[in-house]
Image (tube, rainbow, N blue to C red):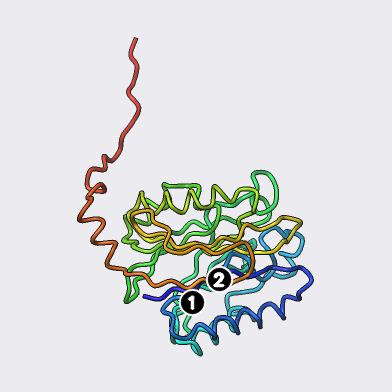
Amino acid sequence: MRVSLIQLDVDPAESAAARRARAAALVRAQQGSDLVVLPELWLLGGFAYEAWSDGAEPLDGPTAEAMAAAAKDAGVWLHAGSIVERDPDGPIYNTSLLYSPAGELVRSYRKIHRFGFDHGEAVVMGAGTELVTVPTEFGTLGLATCYDLRFPELFRALLDAGTEIFVVPAAWPARRREHWTLFARARAVEEQAFVIACNTAGTHGAVEQGGHSLVVDPWGVVLAEAGPGEQVLTVELDPGVVATARAEFPVLRDRLMGIQAPIERA
């Protein structure tokens, strides 16, 4: 299986229309890959809060149309990162889009864990509520986004839903890049699954991005890692390694469910 991660430079000097066209061209250039992944909120910027409301679009908007056409032209599964989704009956959402090689929108995922505490995404956007897994010919994909990486219970729930390959677009800042690598490897080891994590480069919302997109195997081995700037990271991986790792080191069967703290009695 060939995977290509497009680590886009999100430059506020570049218009959204120009970046959309550039991203579509980069996707088309990955013909021959099986799966192509873009970062989180690459069109507007993961920290460009002030641009989100005006730049929000529906699931059949211009970005969705451009990504569907690019996936079909390249003949690839495309995780198109995430967009700011405008729900006509509700708030805006941080929503990931997954397309088949036929250019069909197979599933979307609204980010469950919103970053910012009392600011930014945490107060501007709505929270997703649905776990999303997608069966493919190379294994079941589990979808998560950026800040989700900090919550292992989400990944365990996705594991229980059959996930073998986690796909995680992000706009992870440079100042916490060590956490980015640590969590990607930890989630891979915990769930004995591949983690495909695609970050942004550049600076947006005055926040320098961390880059260093990476692919981690079920043993925690980093198969490939990008640098800090814009680049396409391509790696060959064997999906069969998931079953092998789980059989050779069957740690998941020793899980104890429903553990509670002991009750102290007077």
Mark 1 is surrounded, within 10 Å at the Cα level, by few (under 14), some (14 to 19) or many (20 or more) other residues, namely many
Answer whether labels 2 and 1 touch (C-beta < 8 Å).
yes
- The image shows residue 144 at horizontal and vertical percentages of 48, 59
Identify the residue shown where x is 47% and y is 47%.
Answer: 151
Q: Nearer the viewer, residue 22 or 83?
A: 22
Amino acid of disc 2: Leu
Q: Tag 2, which secondary structure? A: loop
Name the residue tied to disc 1: 78
Name the residue tied to disc 2: 38
- The image shows residue 7 at horizontal and vertical percentages of 58, 69
Q: Nearer the viewer, residue 121 or 36?
A: 36
Q: Nearer the viewer, residue 99 or 3?
A: 3
Q: Tag 1, which secondary structure? A: strand
Q: Say left or right for 7 vs 134.
A: right
Amino acid of disc 1: Leu
Identify the residue shown where x is 54% and y is 47%.
Answer: 179
- The image shows residue 150 at horizontal and vertical percentages of 50, 47
- Mark-to-mark CA distance, 2 and 1: 8 Å
What number is the disc on residue 156?
A: none
- The image shows residue 219 at horizontal and vertical percentages of 33, 54
Identify the residue shown where x is 76% and y is 76%.
Answer: 15
Identify the residue shown where x is 66% and y is 79%.
Answer: 20
Quadrant the C terminus occupies = top left
Q: In this view of the protein, can residue 122 be seen by the observer?
A: yes
Mark 2 is surrounded, within 10 Å at the Cα level, by few (under 14), some (14 to 19) or many (20 or more) other residues, namely many
